[in-house]
Amino acid sequence: MELSKESAPDFPDYVTLRHLNKDHENYVVVNWCVGNTCNYSCSYCPSGLHDGSVKWPDFSTIARFCRSVVDHHPGKKVYFEFTGGEITLWKDFSKLAEVLFLMGCRVGIISNGSRSHQFYEKLIPMIDHVCLSYHPESAKPDHFLKTVQMCAKEIRTHVNFMMHPDFFLENLDLAYKVKEIPNISIAIQPLTKEMGEELFDYTDTQRKVINSQNAFLARQIQHDKAFEYYRGAMEMHKPDGETIKMSPQRFISSGNNSWKGWHCYAGVEQIVVDMKGDIFRGWCLEGGSIGNIRDENLELPSQPVLCSKSYCHCNLDIMTTKTQGQLPVYEPAEVPVEL
Ligand code: SF4
Ligand code: SF4
């Protein structure tokens, strides 16, 4: 099938999108929004994301579903990435993390960093990645700073600062302290109202600070450890072997995030689960629901899906193999290094 100019104006001759790091093909990512219970009530967060109206699922249901995902992907590493509300509030989360650790899975969480330091101390050995988000209306700076320090010593740690305009300077002050912690990644995040499309009213200075953040934050971090990554930059391939490297953000910002009519491996390399337990190939919802985590005879996909969406909006969805025809055969991959 020909790639139309309308679907990818700057890449008319490219036929395949693959992971730049070939080891990433060995990971299946399960991105899972488990519930909407949170101990914060941030003004920019729609109530449906934190009001506790959806009960946490029962442990045995979740454990059975996780087992079925692992069994469906023999020889692959399965990376479960959990979000909430605030996932660490689920009473069974530590138990689940331990079960997944014993099954050889990788586990990542997005957390507001508010649980006790004893809680994180026990959890850290069983997980591989944490994304800690600082929400200035409720978070306590000293507590958050110590949480980041504890996590960064042991696991891959990303820190986000939610840049509400009224808390801009306080956030920056803490971000300057956090950037001294080695081996983290860090970002100050512009916010949209109710997490919609309209940005908060930032001053010109605040916009400049956000736009120039890499120079004074991310590039200042010292690194002396290499943590394992499971997703990253992608590579567009031409049939003659020519390639171009692209990040998901660059696909989106350049308007080249359309693969309509391509075969997409969402559902094979990744699945997503919403807070009702419904399972989809990606957050684009292409192909509709695959089933629910409560289904006892769930059939997960093994084949790619034909993309019918005009645009691919979500970073995770973009970081999935896509092709117009046969996938090219790679040279034998180097044996992945276990970290
Ligand atoms: S911490 Fe996250 S989930 Fe909780 S209210 Fe704030 S934005 Fe919403
Ligand atoms: S929109 Fe969905 S099906 Fe289409 S390319 Fe993106 S992830 Fe794949």
Image (cartoon, grey):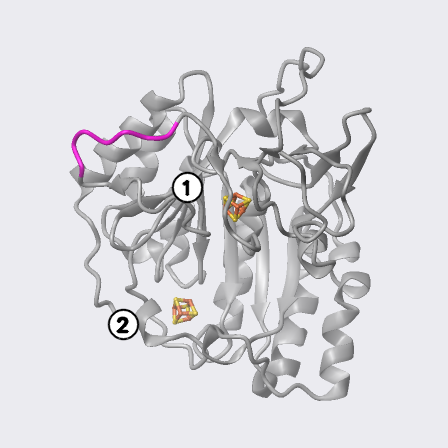
Q: Are marks 1 and 2 in contact (CB under 8 Å)?
A: no
Q: List the residue tagged with mark 1.
A: 281
Q: How many marks?
A: 2
Q: Earlier in the sequence, mark 1 or mark 2?
A: 2
Assign the N terminus to one quadrant of the image: top right
Q: For this view, does 186 lie left or right of residue 271?
A: right
Ligand 1 sits in quadrant: bottom left
Q: For this view, does 108 lie left or right of residue 212?
A: left
Residue at 30% from the left image edge and 33% from the top image edge: 66
**Which is more foreground, mark 1 or mark 2?**
1
Rendered location of residue 331, percent (x, y): 71, 13
In the picture as drawn, the residue positioned furthest to the top comes out as 332
Rendered location of residue 221, percent (x, y): 74, 53
Assign the C terminus to one quadrant of the image: top right
Q: Taken as a whole, is the magenta stretch helix, strand or loop?
A: loop
Residue at 25% from the left image edge and 34% from the top image edge: 65
Q: Vertical placement of 153 versus 143: above or below?
A: above
Residue at 44% from the left image edge and 27% from the top image edge: 303
Q: Distance between the residues labelled 1 and 2?
A: 27 Å
Image quarter for residue 209? bottom right
Give whichever of 274, 226 is nearer the camera: 274
Rendered location of residue 104, percent (x, y): 40, 24
Q: List the residue tagged with mark 2.
A: 51
Dot 2: element:
loop
Q: Does the residue labelled 1 lie within 8 Å of ligand 2?
A: yes
Residue interval drawn in magenta: 295-301
Residue type at tag 2: Asp
Residue type at tag 1: Arg
